Image (tube, helix red, strand yellow):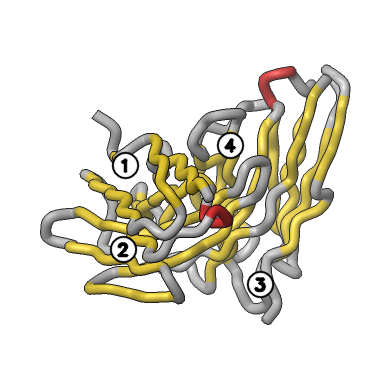
Amino acid sequence: AAGVIQSPRHLIKEKRETATLKCYPIPRHDTVYWYQQGPGQDPQFLISFYEKMQSDKGSIPDRFSAQQFSDYHSELNMSSLELGDSALYFCASSPRPQSNEQFFGPGTRLTVL
Amino acid sequence: KNEVEQSPQNLTAQEGEFITINCSYSVGISALHWLQQHPGGGIVSLFMLSSGKKKHGRLIATINIQEKHSSLHITASHPRDSAVYICAVPRSSGGSNYKLTFGKGTLLTVNP
């Protein structure tokens, strides 16, 4: 069965650079969640989308933006990267927004030098 | 007090032992996820349950919705079970979807 795909899997950037992370949900899943997990930290919710519209927002810095496209894939854009942005960013897809089910991608490990 | 509490934080066991990890939560709706994360790895979903008990291989998860408590059991533990186990609860912020609130995880080490 198709799973959630994230790309790239690993990314190394310098401070003040930009990064774009991509998440491809399971086919026919229209809801995407983004989470950030810093080193030794528990994951934190960043933002979510349903039907190409932002549906909820968590502790996402203003330097980050995200969107969901017509094919339901989502991109997380990160600008003016800081050392503290180094983390595992994973997304999850859900078949519908009111569903308890979330299926996780493998994550993108971002390292900011 | 954290909204999702796990215990213990760290657990060391000998191969073959029966493992129990507990999760209590004060928020969320009627479901709970158990997740596994190997060191440096991504998140793998083990169970999502909203009532009773689920079993997958050597893993068993139970939940008591009224008491807002869940347990993850591993029978005949093996060194490859060594990982961080995280419970997470979906909660609605009044919008139309359910973001997850995570516990701080239990680091399990199974020695041969």
Label 4 CA crowd tier, 10 Å (few <14, some 14–19, many 20+): some
Say yes or no: labels 2 and 3 on the same chain: no
Q: Amino acid at mark 4?
A: Gln
Examine the image and state in which quarter residue B106 appears.
top left
Instruction: Tell which tag, 1 or 3, sits nearer the viewer.
Output: 1
Q: Identify the secondary structure beneath mark 1.
A: strand
Q: Nearer the viewer, residue B5 or B17?
A: B17
In this rendering, the count of numbered labels is: 4
Q: CA distance from mark 2 to mark 3?
A: 21 Å
Give the label, 4 or 3, closer to the camera. 4
Measured Cα–Cα span from mark 4 to mark 3: 22 Å
Circle 4 SS class: strand
In the picture, measured across the screen, residue B15 lies left or right of residue A61, that is left
The residue carrying mark 4 is: A37
| Residue at mark 1 | B6
The reply to whether label 2 and label 1 mark residues of one chain is: yes
Query: Which residue carries the number 2 mark?
Result: B31
